[in-house]
Image: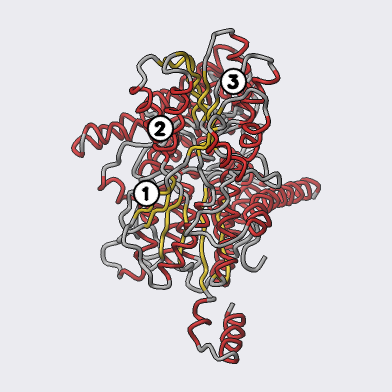
């Protein structure tokens, strides 16, 4: 009970912080409104999927350093196939890319299980492997994305019967993000597999003794991460309209958001809502720093400091609760 | 800013210049760049700052300068739109990937100038170094110097970068003209000094013979490696980076050529943006800056190298710190690297 309370307390705290930051943005830039929020969520999309992917693996007690590279593979695969196969093949291409994502993740997981090497070593190696694969598929940025698919994440989400003013603050990209994550996460959490993922992250020995098949569960967790990374790669292709073989700065940002979002790096604890809120917070912080035209070399220092302070505060609060 | 605006307007009124000057001093320019900690890009940023300050027309610069991809640049440009800047000068991560944000910016009445590399969005202005020509000029000189035959080490930039792709086209064009030239080794340096040095040391250790080295601007460490390993010096082509230009003049027995690739094209971008804001729209949407080749084998080239050499510059900075007809700042201003209000 207290654990649930503490976890939702952390999420509520993050939500309050996000609201405060949005208010601050409005104070700094009075013109900040629906279009600002829309572009903010759109920018957060690849970060959010990368973070969700990493969160699942971390909850299962592992870590996947190849998240950004897998996103690059998914992004270039989608861009190349959409350009060559034409508009009619868009849906099969998307499904294929998602399958590729699951396959990449499962390969990561299988290697971790079979080699018995630490996750960090295996996935670090796979970071380079997937990066190379992305470059093999597409040497320079290129390809294309189907226009109607790109429109899926642009603009506000229209709700029939509601006036435009009321729906302006609900970006399509947010709906897509929530829909995709809910589709993967909600059934998983309620399933036996979801429970097993938490169990092996929390205490593998205890999980094993209670009859959880550690190996297959771990591979499944990595596979789900691959699926989410593929969604991240797709969101990259949709927002830029091309595929980029060189991975973007998503790995470290995802690690930061996972930690900030209340997922324990030791595994077994946390959810997806916290990390996603953390992603949005980090994007708003960047927006505020741009609005204030802070020296770009200082920006990263400020971002890092905010992260450290928030996580330390969380640690302090948790400690006080434990004493009480 | 409104206070500043009022003060400037008052001052202008007092000296009898009217409201015109006041309007000119209030431009805010946004800058978006996606490679941080690279000598060339740092010079580009400094040129932008120096040009903005020297023009006297810019109230403040809003600089988004970090290591990121096209998606991150979309975010930065959209943040600059939110910040309400008058113009955005951008070094695009990709010619197509940031078109959406550029379109949104120009639709909001913001002038967008792409520098260094082109974008395909037609509403943006482009002022850029001709990268294909850059590679072609250097490669042609190198192959000529090698006597039209032999093995060349081809040290490219970053895999997947559009400037690298353009340069590869130029290099291949020269290669076709010299069928006896053989590429002994092709590597991506990632435009990183340490990585490139390691790669050439590994190659020297392999013992495979080579007769010339073409670099995509990571040049001085290559000469260092040749000198340190005490192997015979082969002709080297690089960019006009201060360190390499110094080596071309000082290293005994080194033959080489520097191809200009001014980072100051950033300053030219700011100058172009200001011209457009003042109503002087250029006839052409795209302005290409043609590179020059300065070799130390010809008298003319040597004179150019000597004229351009400047010991005050960081060794990774291009020596061509200004672009005639575009930039108006002087050497001290770009080295100071101070923008308006700093």
- Between label 2 and label 3, give the one nearer the viewer: 2
The residue that appears at 61% across and 37% down in the rendered structure is B245
Residue designated by label 2: B136
| Mark 1: few/some/many CA within 10 Å (<14, 14-19, 20+) | many
**Distance of label 2 from label 3 (alpha carbons):** 23 Å
Query: Which label's residue is closer to the chain start, 1 or 3?
Result: 1
The residue that disc 3 covers is B199
Q: Note whether residue A56 is visible.
A: no
In the rendered view, does A21 fall on the left or right side of A172? right
Provide the residue designation for mark 1.
B119
Q: Label 2: few (<14), some or many (≥20) within 10 Å?
A: many
Location of residue B34 in the rendering, given as x and y in whole percent from the top left corner? 52, 46
Q: Earlier in the sequence, mark 2 or mark 3?
A: 2
In the image: residue A56, left or right of residue A118: left
Q: Are marks 1 and 2 in contact (CB under 8 Å)?
A: no
Which image quarter is the N terminus of chain A in? Answer: top right
């Amino acid at each position: 009970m207290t654990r649930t309370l503490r976890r939702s307390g952390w999420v509520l705290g993050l939500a309050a912080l996000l609201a405060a930051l949005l208010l601050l943005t409005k104070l700094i830039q009075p013109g900040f409104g629906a279009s600002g929020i829309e572009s903010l969520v759109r920018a957060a999309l690849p970060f959010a999927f990368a973070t969700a992917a990493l969160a699942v693996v971390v909850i299962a007690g592992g870590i996947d350093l190849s998240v950004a590279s897998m996103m690059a593979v998914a992004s270039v695969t989608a861009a190349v196939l959409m350009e060559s196969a034409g508009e009619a093949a868009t849906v099969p291409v998307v499904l294929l890319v998602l399958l590729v994502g699951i396959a990449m993740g499962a390969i990561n997981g299988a290697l971790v299980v079979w080699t018995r090497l630490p996750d960090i070593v295996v996935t670090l190696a796979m970071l380079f492997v997937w990066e190379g694969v992305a470059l093999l598929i597409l040497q320079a940025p290129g390809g294309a994305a189907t226009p109607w698919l790109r429109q899926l994440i642009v603009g506000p989400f229209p709700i029939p019967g509601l006036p435009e003013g009321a729906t302006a603050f609900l970006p399509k990209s947010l709906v897509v993000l929530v829909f995709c994550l809910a589709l993967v996460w909600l059934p998983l959490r309620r399933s036996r597999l979801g429970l097993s993922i938490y169990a092996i992250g929390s205490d593998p020995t205890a999980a094993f003794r209670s009859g959880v098949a550690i190996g297959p569960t771990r591979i499944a967790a990595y596979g789900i991460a691959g699926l989410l990374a593929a969604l991240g790669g797709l969101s990259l292709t949709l927002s830029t309209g091309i595929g980029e073989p060189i991975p973007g700065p998503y790995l470290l940002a995802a690690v930061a958001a996972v930690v900030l979002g209340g997922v324990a790096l030791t595994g077994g604890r946390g959810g997806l809502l916290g990390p996603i809120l953390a992603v949005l917070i980090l994007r708003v912080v960047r927006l505020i720093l741009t609005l204030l035209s802070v020296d770009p070399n200082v920006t990263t220092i400020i971002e890092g400091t905010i992260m450290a302070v928030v996580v330390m505060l969380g640690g302090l609060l948790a400690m006080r609760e434990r004493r009480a | 800013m409104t206070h500043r605006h009022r003060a400037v307007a008052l001052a202008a009124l007092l000296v009898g210049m009217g409201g015109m000057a006041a309007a000119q001093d209030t431009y805010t320019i946004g800058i978006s760049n996606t490679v941080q900690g690279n000598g060339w890009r740092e010079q580009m940023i400094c040129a932008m700052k120096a040009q903005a300050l020297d023009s006297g027309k810019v109230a403040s610069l809003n600089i988004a300068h970090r290591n990121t991809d096209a998606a991150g640049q979309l975010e930065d440009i959209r943040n600059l739109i939110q910040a309400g800047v008058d113009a955005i000068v951008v070094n695009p991560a990709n010619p197509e990937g940031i078109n959406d944000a550029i379109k949104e910016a120009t639709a909001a009445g913001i002038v967008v100038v792409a520098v260094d590399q082109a974008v395909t969005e037609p509403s943006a202005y482009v002022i850029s170094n001709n990268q294909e020509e850059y590679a072609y000029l250097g490669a042609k000189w190198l192959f000529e110097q090698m006597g039209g035959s032999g093995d060349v080490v081809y040290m490219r930039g970053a895999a997947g970068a559009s400037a690298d792709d353009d340069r590869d086209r130029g290099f291949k064009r020269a290669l076709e003209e010299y069928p006896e030239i053989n590429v002994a080794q092709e590597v991506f340096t990632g435009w990183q000094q340490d990585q490139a040095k390691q790669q050439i040391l590994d190659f020297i250790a392999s013992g495979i013979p080579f007769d010339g080295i073409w670099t995509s601007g990571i040049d001085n460490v290559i000469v260092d490696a040749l000198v340190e390993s005490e192997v015979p010096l082969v002709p080297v082509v690089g960019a006009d980076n201060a360190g390499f230009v110094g080596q071309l003049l000082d290293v005994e027995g080194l033959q080489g050529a520097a191809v200009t690739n001014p980072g100051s094209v950033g300053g030219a971008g700011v100058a172009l943006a200001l011209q457009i804001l003042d109503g002087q729209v250029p006839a052409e949407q795209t302005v290409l800056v043609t590179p020059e080749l300065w070799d130390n084998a010809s008298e003319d080239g040597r004179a150019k190298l000597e004229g351009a050499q400047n010991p005050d510059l960081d060794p990774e900075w291009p020596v061509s710190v200004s672009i005639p007809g575009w930039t108006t700042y002087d050497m001290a201003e770009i080295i100071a690297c101070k923008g308006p209000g700093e």
